[in-house]
Image: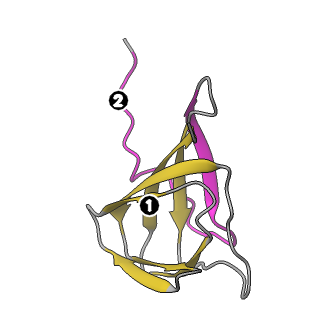
């Protein structure tokens, strides 16, 4: 038996870049990550275009996702989850500057 881990703790006091931590990985591209943001956003003009589906749950903070073609924006609050299909171009438009935004992201191959 392993000790429980709180995903909202062990966050650095300074966070010059988003923190990505793989918590679990498996076959077929399966991966679970904790992502910590604090006022971070994707660089202007940068779009994620991933070959895998990404299911993301916002655990704390606030975030705004932006999608391309068709253009859309989506604000996430703690407890909100969204599935981003493979190759759906998206970016992080903004995260809370005054608090930690903690994401739980699950990636898996497109079938």
Asked whether the residues under the numbered discs 1 and 2 touch, taking CB atoms below 8 Å apart as contact, a structural biologist would say no
Residue in the picture at 66% in, 78% down: 42
Q: Is the residue 23 above or below the residue 52 in the image?
A: above
Q: In which quarter of the image is residue 87?
A: bottom right
The image quadrant where one finds the N terminus is top left
Residue 78 falls in image quadrant: bottom left
Q: Position of residue 60 (x, y in %)?
A: 34, 65
Residue 97 visible in the displayed image: no
Classify residue 73 as left or right of residue 92.
left
Q: Where is residue 37 in the image (x, y as percent from the top left)?
A: 54, 69
Residue found at the far left of this picture:
79
**SS at badge 2:** loop
Side of 5 where 105 appears, left or right: right
Q: Which of 90 and 103 is in front in this view?
A: 90
Residue in view at x 62 percent, y 58 percent? 19
Q: How is the image coloured?
A: secondary structure
Left or right: 85 with respect to 76? right
111 or 65, nearer to the observer: 111
Q: Quadrant of the C terminus?
A: top right
Are there few (<14), some (14-19), or many (20+) residues within 10 Å of tag 1?
A: many
Where is mark 2, residue-wise? Answer: 4
Q: Give the range drawn in magenta.
A: 2-25
Would residue 100 be visible to someone looking at this image? yes
For label 1, the residue is 102
Q: Residue 57, image x and y in percent?
A: 37, 56
Above or below, 61 against 81 in this view is below
Q: Main secondary structure of the magenta part?
A: loop
Q: Is residue 16 magenta?
A: yes
Q: Which of marks 1 and 2 is nearer the N terminus?
A: 2
In this view of the protein, which residue sits in the foreground, 48 or 7? Answer: 48
């Amino acid at each position: 038996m392993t000790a429980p881990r709180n995903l909202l703790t062990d966050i650095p006091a300074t966070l010059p870049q988003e923190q990505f931590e793989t918590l679990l990985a498996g076959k077929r591209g399966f991966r679970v990550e904790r992502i910590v943001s604090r006022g971070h956003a994707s660089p202007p003009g940068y779009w994620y275009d991933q070959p895998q589906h990404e299911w993301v749950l916002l655990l704390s903070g606030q975030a705004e996702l932006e999608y391309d073609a068709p253009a859309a924006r989506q604000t996430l609050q703690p407890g909100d989850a969204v599935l981003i299909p493979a190759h759906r171009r998206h970016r992080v438009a903004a995260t809370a500057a005054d608090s930690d935004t903690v994401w739980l992201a699950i990636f898996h191959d497109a079938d």
